[in-house]
Image (tube, rainbow, N blue to C red):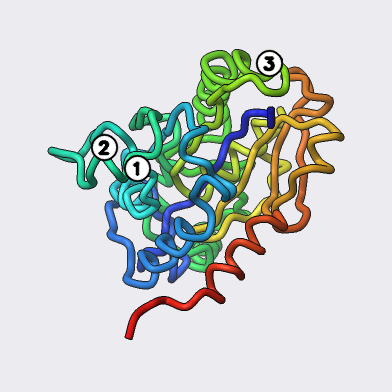
Amino acid sequence: MSPPRVFILRHGETEWSLNGRHTGTTELPLTANGEKRIKATGSALVGEDRLIVPSKLAHVYVSPRRRAQRSLELLHLGCKEKLPWQEHRTHGDDECRTDAKVQISEDIREWDYGEYEGLTSAQIKEQREQRGEGPWDIWTDGCPGGELPKDIALRLDRLIDEIRSRFHSKVIDKKDGDAACGDVLLVAHGHILRSFAMRWIKKSLSDTSFLLEAGGVGTLRYFTSDFIRKSHTNYGASSYEHNRIEEPAILLGGAFMVEVVENAEVANDKPSGKK
């Protein structure tokens, strides 16, 4: 049995993310290109023979912001229950692929940027110079009128403890061949998900150096050396070393799963049957 994982997905592109403006509480729609890229991510990475296997998902956490919720919709996971913000399910029974529940969580809303909401880094630098203030680093300084790094760490540590106790600890010790749905998906934002990766390995946010582009995906996983030999992806991965929940680690990458690539090539070579 493969170890349980946490997938982190940053929402698709918005006008402000495209322009480098800090977007915390402001509600913005995805751009047309942002929607296309999330759909492409879903097609490439979601499926029974793909990175994110719907039938293995135990739970989905999503930010309260609409841009994250729209990104989740576009993945087409095939949840059996309607999404919390929808009046009814938008797909038929034959398209249901997962029993996972979707939960809106304040713990993965984006960093509250306070006075810096809507500003670019260049604008913040200029503003601080005019005030006689020194260089700004969100990972150490936080945001005036918004959240501090300790506030972010507090809510993310709470969420990580919940994921480990509710979902991962129950399946990580199961033997090969035992059926278990322990994967968890988070759909949220750039700064909060980068912070999540740091807190996953119990590091200070001041050490953050990871990047996660709009529409980007990361994988957090428990692993053993045998598992690494059998299954690889080209996505950064946080994990647990030696298959122990007490030993978080980061797997930086590998190669695409050969079976997935071969299946895609075969599907592309088949005649469509259309005139």
**Farthest residue, direction left:** 87
Residue 254 x/y as whole percent: 78, 54
Could you tell me the amino acid type at mark 2?
A: Leu
Could you tell me the amino acid type at mark 1?
A: Gly
**Farthest residue, direction bottom:** 275
Give the class, few, some or many, for how many residues have Cα within 10 Å of label 1's Cα (few <14, many ≥20). Answer: many
Could you tell me the amino acid type at mark 3?
A: Lys
Looking at the rendered image, the quarter that the C terminus falls into is bottom left
Give the class, few, some or many, for how many residues have Cα within 10 Å of label 2's Cα (few <14, many ≥20). Answer: some
> Where on the picture, by quarter, is residue 262?
bottom right
> Where on the picture, by quarter, is residue 23?
bottom left
Q: Residue beneath label 2, please?
A: 83
Q: What residue is rendered at 84% in x and 43% in y?
A: 229
Q: Which mark is residue 174?
A: 3
Q: In screen coordinates, is 186 left or right of 6?
A: left
Residue 64 x/y as whole percent: 32, 38
Looking at the rendered image, the quarter that the N terminus falls into is top right
**Gap in Å between the C-alphas at discs 1 and 3?**
26 Å
Q: Residue beneath label 1, please?
A: 78
Tell me whether circle 2 and circle 3 mark residues in contact (CB < 8 Å): no
Residue 89 x/y as whole percent: 20, 40
Q: What residue is rendered at 27% in x and 52% in y?
A: 27
User: 142 or 240: nearer the eye?
Assistant: 240
Mark 2 secondary-structure assignment: loop
Nearer to us of marks 2 and 3 is 3
Mark 3 secondary-structure assignment: loop
Q: Earlier in the sequence, mark 2 or mark 3?
A: 2
Q: Which mark is residue 248?
A: none
Mark 1 secondary-structure assignment: loop
